[in-house]
Image (cartoon, rainbow, N blue to C red):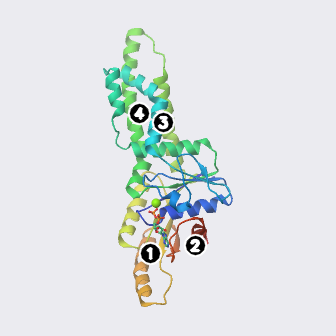
C-alpha cells in the first residue's frame, strides 16, 4: 500500500501548494501527515497555521497533521542518541583521544542537512502513527541530495566499519576472542536503516514521487533532469503536475501566452510519454490558507 508521497521540482513551481492539497485529499480517507524538508519552510504559511518539529493537528481538517523538519535539531538529537556508540568506534579504531573526538563531533559535516532530513523522514514513517506521509521537498538540487543521502550514510558506515575491522583484528589477534559491543550494534542498526530507506524509496507500491513543474523553459529543463536523476537512484516518477497553465483565451495576451505554454507542455509530455500528467490552471488568487487550498485540490484531483 502507498505510504509515502514526495513532491519535488524547481523553486516556486507550486510544490508546497501541491503537497498541501495532496495531503488534504488523502486526509479525507486516511490519517495523514504532511511535512517539509525544505530548510526554507513555507508549509505553515500555506496551511495558515504555526508549525513546529513535532506533528501538529491542522485545525479545521480531520485526520491531517503537519510538521517542518528542523535539520539542526534532528542532528542534535541524533548525536545525543548515538554519541556513545560513535565515540566507542572512533576511540577503539583510531589514535584519537577524547579531546580530538570532541572536535570531530563539533565539525560541520557536509550533507548533514539532507541526511538528517532523510533520517527524520524514515523515523516518522517507521513510527507508523499515520497511514500516509506527504513530503514537501526542497528545490531540485537539495531534494536530489536528500534522496541520494542513503549513499552518503553508507559511505560513513563504511569508514566506521573499517575502523571496527582494524580494532577487531587486533583484539582477536591479541586476546584471542572478540565480543561485539555497542559500536557494532550501532553499525548494524545504521546499515539496516539505510537498507530500509532505499527499499522504501525504490518500492513503487509504497512510495511515489510526483514531479511538479510549470510550462516555462527553465522549469521544464530542470524537470527533465530531475526525473532522469531520480531514475538513476532507482526512484521512478509516474506523475507529473504542470502547474500555472493559462486557461482563458478571451484576450490576445492569454491566447499568445497559452500558445507558448502548449509548446512546453507538448515537449515534456512527449519526452516522458509514460507519465500521468495533470494540468493545473493558473488561479487568479494566491494559494494560501485552507480555503484556497481546498479549491486548488479540486484542480489537482478532478
Ligand atoms: N496554480 C496557481 N495559481 C496561482 N498561484 C499559484 C498557483 N500555484 C502556486 N501559486 C502561488 O505561487 C507561489 C509559489 O507556490 P509554492 O507552492 O510555494 O511553490 P514552491 O513550494 O514550489 O516554491 C505561491 O505564492 C502560491 O500561492
Ligand atoms: Mg515550497
Residue at the image point whose x is 41% and y is 48% from the top: 148
Instruction: Give whichever of discs 4 and 2 has the lower sequence position.
Output: 4
According to the image, label 2 marks what residue? 299
Instruction: Give whichever of discs 2 and 1 has the lower sequence position.
Output: 1
In space, the residues marked 3 and 2 are separated at their CA atoms by 40 Å
Question: Relative to 44, does residue 92 appear above or below in the rendering?
Answer: above
In space, the residues marked 3 and 1 are separated at their CA atoms by 44 Å
Marks 2 and 1: which is nearer the front? 2
In space, the residues marked 4 and 2 are separated at their CA atoms by 45 Å
In space, the residues marked 4 and 3 are separated at their CA atoms by 19 Å
Instruction: Give whichever of discs 1 and 4 has the lower sequence position.
Output: 4
Instruction: Give whichever of discs 4 and 3 has the lower sequence position.
Output: 3
Out of 12 and 212, give the one closest to the viewer.
Answer: 12
Label 1 CA crowd tier, 10 Å (few <14, some 14–19, many 20+): many
In space, the residues marked 2 and 1 are separated at their CA atoms by 17 Å
Residue 265 shows which numbered tag? 1
Residue 78 point in image, percent of width and height:
47, 35
Residue at the image point whose x is 61% and y is 61% from the top: 24
Amino acid at each position: 500500500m502507498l505510504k509515502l508521497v514526495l513532491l519535488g521540482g524547481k523553486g516556486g513551481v507550486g510544490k508546497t501548494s501541491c503537497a498541501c492539497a495532496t495531503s488534504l485529499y488523502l486526509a479525507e480517507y486516511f490519517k495523514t501527515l504532511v511535512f517539509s524538508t525544505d530548510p526554507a519552510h513555507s508549509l505553515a504559511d500555506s496551511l495558515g497555521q504555526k508549525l513546529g518539529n513535532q506533528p501538529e493537528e491542522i485545525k479545521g481538517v480531520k485526520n491531517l497533521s503537519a510538521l517542518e523538519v528542523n535539520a539542526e535539531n534532528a542532528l542534535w538529537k541524533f548525536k545525543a542518541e548515538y554519541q556513545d556508540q560513535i565515540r566507542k568506534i572512533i576511540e577503539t579504531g583510531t589514535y584519537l583521544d577524547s579531546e580530538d573526538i570532541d572536535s570531530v563531533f563539533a565539525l560541520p559535516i557536509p550533507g548533514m542537512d539532507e541526511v538528517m532530513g532523510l533520517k527524520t523522514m524514515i523515523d516518522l514513517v517507521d513510527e507508523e502513527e499515520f497511514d500516509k506521509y506527504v513530503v514537501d521537498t526542497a528545490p531540485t538540487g537539495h531534494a536530489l541530495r536528500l534522496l541520494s543521502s542513503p549513499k552518503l550514510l553508507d559511505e560513513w558506515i563504511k569508514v566506521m566499519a573499517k575502523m571496527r575491522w582494524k580494532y577487531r583484528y587486533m583484539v582477536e589477534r591479541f586476546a584471542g576472542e572478540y565480543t561485539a559491543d555497542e559500536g557494532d550494534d550501532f553499525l548494524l542498526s545504521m546499515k539496516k536503516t539505510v537498507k530500509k530507506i532505499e527499499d522504501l524509496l525504490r518500492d513503487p507500491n509504497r512510495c511515489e514521487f510526483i514531479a511538479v513543474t510549470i510550462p516555462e523553459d527553465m522549469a521544464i529543463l530542470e524537470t527533465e533532469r530531475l526525473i532522469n536523476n531520480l531514475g538513476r537512484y532507482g526512484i521512478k516518477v509516474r506523475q507529473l503536475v504542470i502547474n500555472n497553465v493559462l486557461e482563458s483565451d478571451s484576450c490576445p495576451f492569454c491566447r499568445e501566452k497559452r500558445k507558448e505554454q502548449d509548446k512546453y507542455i507538448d515537449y515534456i509530455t512527449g519526452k516522458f510519454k509514460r507519465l500521468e500528467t495533470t494540468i493545473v490552471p493558473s488561479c487568479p488568487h494566491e494559494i494560501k490558507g485552507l480555503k484556497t487550498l481546498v479549491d486548488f485540490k479540486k484542480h489537482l484531483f478532478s
